[in-house]
Amino acid sequence: MPLHNGDAERPRDHRRHPVNPFYGEADPVAGMETSPPVHALPDGPISPHNAYQFVHDELMLDGNARLNLATFVTTWMEPQATVLMSECRDKNMIDKDEYPRTAELERRCVAMLANLWHAPDPSAIMGCSTTGSSEACMLAGMALKRRWARRNQDRYPGTARPNLVMGANVQVCWEKFCNFWEVEARQVPMEGDRFHLDADSAAALCDENTIGVVAVLGSTFDGSYEPVAEICGALDALQERTGLDVPVHVDGASGAMVAPFLDPELVWDFRLPRVASINTSGHKYGLVYPGVGWALWRNQEALPEELVFRVNYLGGDLPTFALNFSRPGAQVAAQYYTFLRLGRDGYRAVQQVTRDVARSMAERIGALGDFRLLTRGDQLPVFAFTTADDVTSFDVFDVSRRLKERGWLVPAYTFPPNRQDLSVLRVVCRNGFSLDLADTFLADLEELLPELRRQPAPLGRPENVATAFHH
Ligand SMILES: *Cc1c(COP(=O)(O)O)cnc(C)c1O
């Protein structure tokens, strides 16, 4: 989100909301209500009907979520979930005493996730809801840092500078964490066809100041799963060699709600003793509208007690761990609803259809001949592709721009070090993106290609969007 400045002095900011004389309570012949300014707090009130219409009309110009192949975030829920959310929209998650049932639903969700992620001792698990994975990652990073600081009291604060090891493909929240909490971000660059963290490079970057290793399931850049078990194995070997005991946090923003259902054989979770904590976004493949994430720690040792604050709860104390204080409770109710509604089999069916659509789209795009697939949508239902080596008349930025003319949002961006030479398009399939829509997308792409092929050369990438895309 951009930081906004409050300067309303630019000429365009003196605009007023145009009042349509044939709107609602405005009398078309006499006494139309004054049109309020757009950028300054109006002097007086207007009717709720008109206020609604102004805001509604303005928001109509936002994109169509169904055609958005850029975002991981849920854009459709069942009507019952919507009703439930509006019933809960006045509930503040932090008021555990006033809303003990909401607190109870949160507790049950944590228990369900502990079970889903194979906690060896579910009663030891500590977990909470958050506003999303970003907050969950901040909390997990803080726990790692505090554990390391405790072990290194003789050197920190003082001479030692903590570091966190990760791939260059991490989501931007990890760069934020390192910046905000003054931790060195040790990033393993991409090399050749390796587009995410690998076990040996991760272990090689660890030293006595490493608070942890972040393994991503899966990468936002191309939808691939990082080899969590191999990373843990390399860190086991490191411990045997050097005595360094480096914990792993799994950023399962997307994959922690995909792999348990579609890849049950893949061992990436609390089955690996080195995995200290896991996060996921309830609002991605957890299938809930924006505003909910989850963080779970294996046990109390993984979440230092001094980070936990207590709030009043039915005359007692309830431990909480959060950056925010007040937060809506509706999303937690909606998460519980979705867990209850779908169950394991339901989630498996929903995610399977989504992944089938992704794989089918990837295959068909690959077959066009103009593109080279980097991933095939067979891990996260997400794939990345670039132009084929012999394509010289257009680039991925041209494709993204032309697709936008037809309403499709498909981001094009450049990979991080050391593959800044590689620019890709990425498609994220979500529940609700049907095979029908995929057919329409393919038809639109095929229709654009002859024109793109006729271009003398790529039209030039827009500098401001080329490298700054993060999701
Ligand atoms: C989306 C994402 C995040 C950030 O999650 P939000 O829920 O949007 O805050 C972090 N890590 C990964 C791997 C992601 O995909």
Image (cartoon, helix red, strand yellow):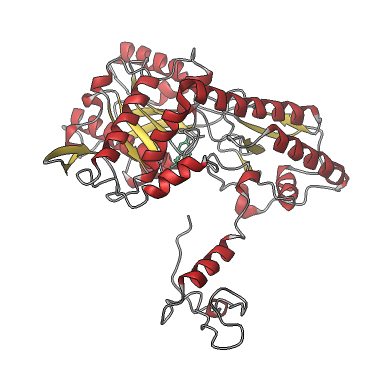
Nearer to us in this view, 235 or 350: 350
Residue 290 showing in the rendered view: no
Residue at position x 70%, y 29% in the image: 362
**420 up-or-down from 257: above or below:** below
Say above or below: 262 vs 26: above
Q: Where is residue 94 in the image (x, y as percent from the top left)?
A: 25, 46
Q: From the viewer's perspective, is residue 353 above or below residue 234? A: below
Q: Residue at x 59, y 29 (%)?
A: 381
Residue 1 is situated, as x and y percent measured from the top left of the image, at 48, 55
Left of 9 or right of it: where is 129?
left
Q: Position of residue 185 (x, y in %)?
A: 40, 37
Occupied quadrant, residue 234: top left
Extreme residue toward the bottom, this view: 30
Residue visible at 86% across and 46% down in the picture: 451
As rendered, which of 337 and 279 lies closer to the eye? 337
Viewer can see residue 306: yes
> Residue 248 at x, y = what percent?
36, 24
Residue drawn at x 38%, y 48% is: 87
Taking the image as shown, residue 299 lies to the left or right of residue 72, namely left
Drawn side of residue 224 relative to residue 450, left or right: left
Total numbered labels placed on residues in the image = 0
